[in-house]
Image (cartoon, grey):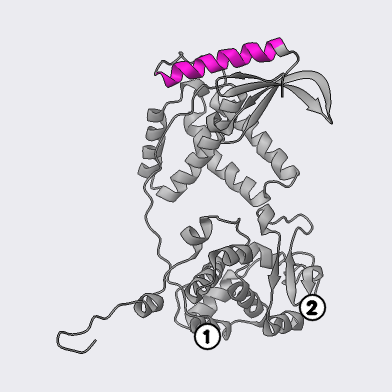
Amino acid sequence: MPDARKFGDLSVRPEVIKGQSTGKWFIDIPSSITSTGRRIRKRFATKNQAEAVAKEVARELKFRNLGFWKKSKRSNLLFNDAADEWLKSKQLEADIQTLSLSTLRTIRIRIMPLKAFFGKYDVSDIRSEDIGRYQRGRIEAKRKGVTVNGETRVLRQIFGWLADKGYIDTIPKFKRAGEEYRRFDIPAPETVVALLSKLPLVNRVLIRLLAETGMRPSEALNLPWAHIEEQQQRIRVEAYGTWRPKTQVSRRIVPLNEGMMKELLSLPRRGVYVFAGKDPSKPLQNVRTALATAAKATGLPRPSLKLFRKAYASWQAEKGLHPRLLQELMGHAPGSKVTDQHYVFASEAAMRKAGITLPVAGEAV
């Protein structure tokens, strides 16, 4: 484009829509130098304005690369106010269904201790040492490392938003808190079968569905009859009523075997939901009591509903299912590390099977 000009890593270009110039100009900021890792465009009314800003930014970037830093300006924005404004942006994402309501609820919970600690700070005054003190205080308050790291992930997102808005020049660096490795005792399929035999009909079908498909508990509990496709032997996981799938890739097709489909269709139709609660217009709420009773009867530790999703992922991994296919079945993004890091666990039986036995000296190999 002949009118484009380079200022270091930045480019100044005219705005063109459908081949026609609008008269506006923008600065093109490459993903390599943004706080979010995404390309950003800043729009200006005139070419002179865009070039003046680009020249200044390029100059500051050059100084920073040489080790010279411009003294940060005060933002005059308290963290409490910044957090509230950032939450409004998250609420908007939930309103347009690019953020799940469950994720928004989690964010609201995690931001509370951050506001309690950093609330009166000017956001430009928060340093790495302050974040370290926050982490130490949370650990001393007996919060687990995984909890503290969840909170500081939200803090990092807020800093990224502040940097994009121009309230801060740099994002404070900090390390994650140590996390205790959580080992799950993944039950064998035979153990789950024994558990199913002790459950009443509706609960039995629910747990079997979770174990055979790896669906999230919320996906199964909010499953309407309208999303079961008998002829194709599958379930459509998609929005229904006020419920939304966790992410965009959570919207998917879940194939069923003949036996699972038969069990689902054998359930009484008391309302719009497959697993209806006492109020037929609402999903089943209390599953834990029946599950705990059945687990006690079979001599098993009390399981959570999410355990069966982890069991499904672990069984499939032991069978050698390709990770990409497992991600698709579970509603995880392609290439996501979440599947391996949080859902696939090695059972003792699988580790024994993978063991190596060396020959005794003198024996034929």
Residue 83: which numbered mark, if any?
none
Tell me if 196 is positioned left or right of 249 in this view.
left
Which residue sits at x=46%, y=73%? 186
**Camera sees residue 173:** yes
Height in image: 163 above or below 92? above
Three-letter code, disc 2: Glu
| Residue for badge 1 | 194
Observer-nearest residue: 37 or 197? 37
Q: Are marks 2 and 1 in contact (CB under 8 Å)?
A: no
- Callout 1 environment at 10 Å: few (<14), some (14 to 19), or many (20+)? some
User: Residue 319 at what x, y percent from top left?
Assistant: 50, 76
| Residue for badge 2 | 230
Q: Earlier in the sequence, mark 2 or mark 1?
A: 1
User: Residue 140 at what x, y percent from top left?
Assistant: 35, 42
Observer-nearest residue: 291 or 17? 17
Quadrant showing the N terminus:
top right
User: Residue 323 at what x, y percent from top left?
Assistant: 54, 65
Height in image: 99 above or below 125? below
Look at the image and give the residue range highlighted in magenta.
48-66
The answer for how far apart the CA atoms under marks 2 and 1 are is 27 Å
Prevailing secondary structure of the magenta residues = helix
**Residue lying farthest to the front in this orientation:** 2
Quadrant showing the C terminus:
bottom left
Q: Would residue 49 be counted in the magenta stretch?
A: yes
- At mark 2, the secondary structure is loop
**Camera sees residue 159:** no
Three-letter code, disc 1: Ala
The image quarter containing residue 162 is: top right
User: Residue 66 at what x, y percent from top left?
Assistant: 41, 18
